[in-house]
Amino acid sequence: MAIAHATMHQVAPHTWTFQAPEVPVAPMKANCRACRQSVAILRPSAMDLKTGNYVVRGECERCGSEVLLIVS
């Protein structure tokens, strides 16, 4: 599984700067149709459907095909 660490640096008292990882990984998994496995979602993007469901679209960490996670 891909592991990406964000970095935080203190630039002044009570002030921090955040640098996002190069390959963003959602803190969730979805089932990949191609791999037929539960995989981490790479390059996640949120979608909103008119049905009221929340959808996260991204890429499979193993084969790169599209994976969807639907939260109702």
Image (cartoon, grey):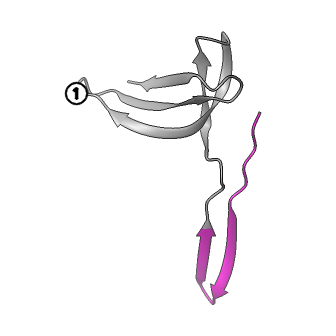
Q: Residue at x 58, y 30 (%)?
A: 59
The amino acid at mark 1 is Lys
Percent coordinates x, y for residue 53 in the rendering:
33, 26
Residue located beneath label 1 in the image: 50
- 32 in relation to 18, above or below: above
Q: Could you tell me which quadrant the C terminus lies in?
A: top left
> In the rendered structure, does residue 9 fall within the stretch colored magenta?
yes
Q: Could you tell me which quadrant the N terminus lies in?
A: top right
Percent coordinates x, y for residue 7 in the rendering:
70, 65
Q: Quadrant of residue 21?
A: bottom right
Q: Residue at x 28, y 28 (%)?
A: 49
- 21 in relation to 68, above or below: below
Percent coordinates x, y for residue 31 in the rendering:
60, 17
Element type at marker 1? Answer: loop
Of 34 and 46, the residue lying toward us: 34
- 25 in relation to 68, above or below: below
Q: Residue at x 73, y 55 (%)?
A: 5
Q: Quadrant of residue 33?
A: top right
Q: Residue at x 65, y 54 (%)?
A: 22
**What's the magenta region?**
1-18
In the image, taking residue 4 as reference, residue 15 lies left or right, namely: left
Of 9 and 72, the residue lying toward us: 9
Of 3 and 22, the residue lying toward us: 22
> In the rendered structure, does residue 30 fall within the stretch colored magenta?
no
